């Protein structure tokens, strides 16, 4: 059995264990398994994908770093002697940076001027909807957070919405399987983040945490599937795994 198949099997096993731990409410253990799963996914991408795109790889690496940092903060309380939760800002900052790399990756494949001319009303609608959704979702936390934390949450949610908007615009332009997988992944990322906010600040029901984790696993499944597809010089999608590109 090849190393990539071993890693793939190990990743599936980790995903199942992670969801099981979340279902049992074992947050610390689940956080550790989640971090290990992200590291495994990053290694699998580096080994399996022949022509790796640096921006997508940076997305995986920084997301993995955020997960490792999050697990460490479960074990060690760095903010016990401080009035400022530095780990909160560092952790969210790493997630924002990782999503920023993915957004730049998507934007780099889009001719924005042609896209805006081709879909002017759709682009405007996405902008208006994005502002509305970000404001609505973030306002659910306003009574629970300080002003700096609220700003961080607003920026975080805005980045997620930008990711979804560009993924949708990318799909409208290309209308192929690679763009569809990317869009589905971004939709599940949005679902995961919204449910996580509800779990943290509205209703402390474990089922919400489980759903959040399940949607995150599905999101990264579709992100990985889209990374296995590439385009030739004419823009036509190629499915040969010997010529893979993210």
Image: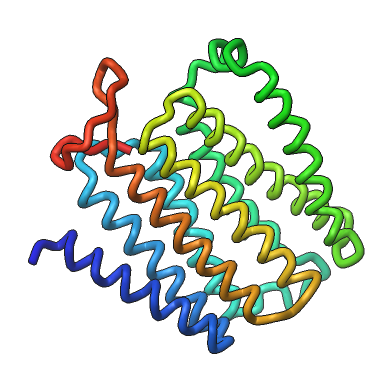
Q: Left or right of 151: which side holds 90?
A: left
Point out residue 203 in the picture as x, y percentages from the top left corner: 77, 76
Answer with the quarter of the image where residue 121 lies: top right
161 in relation to 2, above or below: above
85 in relation to 219, above or below: below
Specify how the rendered protein is coloured.
rainbow
**Residue at figure coordinates x 40%, y 80% from the top left:** 17
Give the farthest residue toward the left. Answer: 1
Q: Between residues 63 and 235, which one lies in front from this camera angle?
A: 235
Q: Left or right of 196: which side holds 152?
A: right
> In which quadrant will I find the C terminus?
top left
218 in relation to 176, above or below: below
**Residue at figure coordinates x 75%, y 53% from the top left:** 153
> In which quadrant will I find the N terminus?
bottom left
Give the farthest residue toward the right. Answer: 143
Point out residue 172 in the picture as x, y percentages from the top left corner: 51, 27
166 in relation to 85, above or below: above
**Residue at figure coordinates x 54%, y 84% from the top left:** 23
Answer with the quarter of the image where residue 55 lies: top left
How many marks on residues?
0
Point out residue 67 in the picture as x, y percentages from the top left corner: 51, 64
Q: Left or right of 44: which side holds 111?
A: right
Point out residue 161 in the picture as x, y percentages from the top left corner: 66, 42
Q: Between residues 244 and 100, which one lies in front from this camera angle?
A: 244
**Residue at figure coordinates x 48%, y 23% from the top left:** 173
């Amino acid at each position: 059995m090849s190393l990539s198949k071993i890693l793939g099997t190990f990743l599936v096993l980790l995903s199942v264990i992670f969801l099981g731990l979340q279902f049992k409410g074992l947050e610390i253990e689940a956080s550790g398994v989640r971090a290990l799963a992200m590291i495994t996914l990053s290694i699998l991408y580096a080994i399996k994908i022949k022509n790796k795109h640096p921006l997508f790889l940076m997305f995986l690496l920084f997301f993995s770093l955020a997960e490792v940092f999050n697990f460490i903060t479960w074990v060690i309380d760095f903010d016990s002697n401080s009035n400022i939760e530095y780990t909160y800002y560092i952790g969210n900052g790493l997630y924002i940076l990782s999503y920023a790399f993915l957004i730049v990756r998507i934007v780099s494949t889009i001719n924005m001027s042609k896209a805006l001319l081709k879909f002017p009303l759709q682009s405007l609608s996405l902008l208006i909807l994005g502002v509305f959704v970000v404001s609505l979702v973030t306002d659910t936390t306003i009574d629970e957070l300080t002003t700096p934390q609220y700003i961080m949450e607003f920026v975080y949610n805005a980045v997620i919405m930008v990711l979804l908007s560009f993924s949708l615009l990318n799909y409208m332009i290309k209308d192929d399987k690679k763009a569809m997988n990317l869009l589905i992944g971004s939709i599940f990322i949005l679902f995961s983040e919204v449910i996580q906010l509800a779990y943290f600040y509205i209703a402390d029901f474990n089922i919400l945490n489980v759903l959040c984790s399940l949607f995150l696993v599905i999101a990264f499944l579709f992100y990985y599937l889209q990374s296995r597809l590439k385009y030739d010089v004419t823009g036509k999608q190629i499915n040969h795994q010997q010529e893979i590109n993210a």
